[in-house]
């Protein structure tokens, strides 16, 4: 086919067609004879001695099936089929020797002295004509019969359909091979990376079957490679941890939730070391096309040696508990010394009793926030303001009901704020017992806690007590203690209102002062 024909308006460029033709693996189609039956039927249908099926690229016309000829390739620019693909119906050449397009063709001027030609184009799904199925005769013929023309067109579509099926299958195989190569390369990269990590790395199939461990796992455990595949991993756990670890792993498999657990793993030296195990699921695309929302395709996990850290934490807890216990004993000793001094000097008995109560309040605050063992831990919650107030107010409650009622928001506190809070509310409760609502049998106190974004508001409302009068003299020790606790140590503000039936106090304290978290 000539260059000027290739550039004609409305005709696909040769290079475009050539790219398509290259995708059909012509040599394999020809060698396997995949279209030979169609070429044979075309010859029989048209009663012709020669039948060919060709595909045409930039330079050559290549024959993928042939009957009555041994030719494999011919120049495209002088080919009969190169002209047939320019139309969309069967092209008929009654006498090639009289056709200016083919009169000088070597196979027309010489052996086998071709005369008659009929060819139907092979048209791809995008409308590009890629070649033709054709018949030749060495004698002139006026035309084909209508049936023969229709049959040749049907055979052209059948040939094109087979070629397309084969191309798609070939492309699918190539894609799968490419994916397989990419997956293998990805696995090599992953395994290389995993083997360089200080952590133990493992992965499982969606059902939890372990099929990979990195080099660090085998180095740590010293077990033969592959011996922990499947469910064998649980055998290297400490016997006391196996049931717990297995239950946690089954829960993650059933729910798809992340896996995290601390357990003891048998080391190569025969000892058991504490390890932190973690795993996350990898999911495929969900039904809406979003990534990470579909079915689990694999689990990836790590095991981190935390043995030294675990021992250090346990040692610190033991030391901290022992220190806290001794501090609490110091409070008790001081309170005992105060009581002893009061018995020796009755004139300071009242002051001593007040001091002893303050020391006791500090002891309660310390006991509330100090580290505890499982045996010493109080039943109440130890990290909230409500929990601390419940500890402080317990001595003031009556057997038949609550005289001090705490309600409102839950606010976290820590050891830093527990001491000033204990002094503040112990002072308020003590004053209420001496002069306020708790000095009457029917009196009560409502403590309401509310929190906004930055601060906590604590309202202390006494009711049912004797009338109270605002002090006119300089502030006493109790007032100074309240100011010290709430204002100086916690950075808050205090507002007081002396009502007819008791004190109303509002404290505004920054949340940051109550808890480091």
Image (spheres, rainbow, N blue to C red):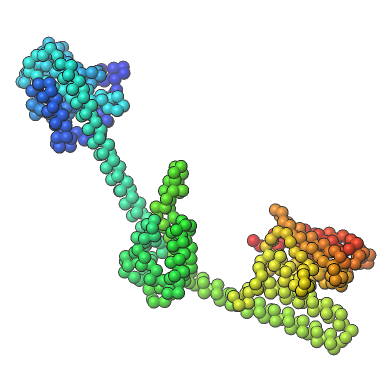
Residue 171 in the image: above or below residue 514: above
Determine the image quadrant of residue 433: bottom right
Determine the image quadrant of residue 33: top left
Task: Kindly identify the residue that appears in the image at 33 percent across and 48 percent down.
Answer: 182
Task: Kindly identify the residue that appears in the image at 42 percent across and 50 percent down.
Answer: 295
Q: Nearer the viewer, residue 153 or 226?
A: 153
Residue 371 in the image: above or below residue 71: below
- Is 86 placed left or right of 400 in the picture? left
Residue 111 in the image: above or below residue 271: above
Furthest residue in direction right, as rendered: 472
**Residue 325 position in % (x across, y down):** 66, 79
Image quadrant occupied by the C terminus:
bottom right
Q: Can I make out residue 250 in this image? A: yes
Furthest residue in direction left, as rendered: 111
Q: Nearer the viewer, residue 297 or 316?
A: 297
**How many labels, in total?**
0
Q: Can I make out residue 104 in this image? A: no
Image quadrant occupied by the N terminus:
top left
Task: Kindly identify the residue that appears in the image at 65 percent across and 73 percent down.
Answer: 378
**Residue 213 position in % (x across, y down):** 36, 62
**Residue 68 position in % (x across, y down):** 8, 26
- Is 67 placed left or right of 22 in the picture? left
Q: Nearer the viewer, residue 148 or 29?
A: 148
**Residue 392 position in % (x across, y down):** 75, 71
Furthest residue in direction front, as rendered: 400
Determine the image quadrant of residue 177: top left
- Is 4 placed left or right of 368 in the picture? left
Task: Kindly identify the residue that appears in the image at 71 percent across and 54 percent down.
Answer: 452
């Amino acid at each position: 086919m000539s260059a000027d024909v290739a550039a004609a308006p409305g005709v696909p460029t040769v290079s475009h067609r050539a790219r398509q033709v290259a995708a059909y693996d012509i040599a394999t189609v020809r060698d396997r004879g995949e279209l030979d039956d169609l070429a044979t039927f075309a010859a029989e249908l048209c009663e012709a001695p020669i039948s060919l099926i060709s595909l045409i690229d930039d330079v050559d016309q290549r024959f993928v099936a042939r009957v009555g000829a041994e030719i494999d390739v011919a120049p495209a620019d002088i080919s009969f089929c190169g002209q047939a693909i320019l139309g969309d119906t069967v092209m008929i050449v009654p006498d090639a020797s009289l056709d200016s397009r083919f009169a000088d063709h070597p196979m027309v001027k010489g052996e086998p002295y071709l005369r008659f030609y009929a060819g139907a184009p092979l048209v791809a799904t995008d409308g590009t004509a890629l070649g033709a199925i054709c018949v030749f005769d060495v004698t002139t013929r006026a035309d084909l019969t209508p049936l023969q023309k229709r049959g040749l067109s049907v055979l052209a579509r059948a040939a094109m359909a087979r070629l397309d099926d084969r191309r798609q299958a070939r492309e699918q195989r190539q894609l799968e091979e490419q994916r397989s190569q990419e997956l293998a390369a990805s696995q090599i990269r992953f395994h290389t990376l995993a083997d360089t990590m200080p952590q133990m790395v493992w992965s499982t199939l969606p059902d939890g079957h372990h099929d990979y461990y990195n080099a660090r796992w085998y180095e740590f455990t010293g077990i033969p490679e592959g011996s922990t595949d499947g469910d064998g991993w649980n055998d290297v756990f400490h016997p006391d941890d196996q049931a717990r670890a297995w239950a946690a792993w089954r829960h993650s498999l059933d729910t798809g939730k992340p896996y995290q657990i601390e357990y003891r793993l048998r080391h190569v030296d025969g000892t058991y070391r504490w390890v932190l195990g973690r795993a996350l699921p990898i999911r495929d695309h969900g039904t809406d096309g979003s990534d990470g929302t579909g079915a689990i395709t694999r689990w990836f996990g790590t095991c981190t040696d935390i043995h030294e850290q675990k021992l250090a934490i346990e040692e610190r807890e033991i030391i901290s508990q022992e220190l806290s216990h001794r501090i609490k004993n110091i409070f008790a000793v001081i309170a005992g010394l105060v009581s002893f001094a009061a018995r020796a000097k009755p004139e300071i008995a009242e002051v001593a009793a007040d001091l002893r109560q303050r020391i006791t309040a500090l002891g309660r605050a310390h006991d509330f926030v100090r580290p505890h063992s499982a045996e010493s831990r109080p039943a109440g919650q130890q990290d909230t303001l409500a929990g601390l107030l419940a500890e402080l107010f317990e001595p003031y409650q009556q057997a038949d009901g609550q005289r001090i009622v705490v309600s409102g928001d839950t606010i976290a506190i820590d050891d830093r704020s527990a001491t000033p809070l204990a002094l503040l509310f112990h002072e308020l409760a003590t004053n209420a017992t001496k002069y306020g609502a708790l000095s009457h049998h029917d009196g009560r106190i409502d403590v309401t806690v509310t929190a906004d974004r930055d601060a906590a508001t604590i309202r202390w409302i006494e009711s049912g007590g004797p009338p109270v009068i605002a002090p006119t003299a300089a502030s006493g020790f109790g007032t100074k203690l309240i100011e010290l606790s709430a204002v100086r140590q916690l950075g808050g503000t205090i507002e007081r209102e002396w009502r007819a039936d008791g004190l109303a106090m509002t404290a505004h304290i920054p949340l940051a002062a109550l808890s480091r978290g």
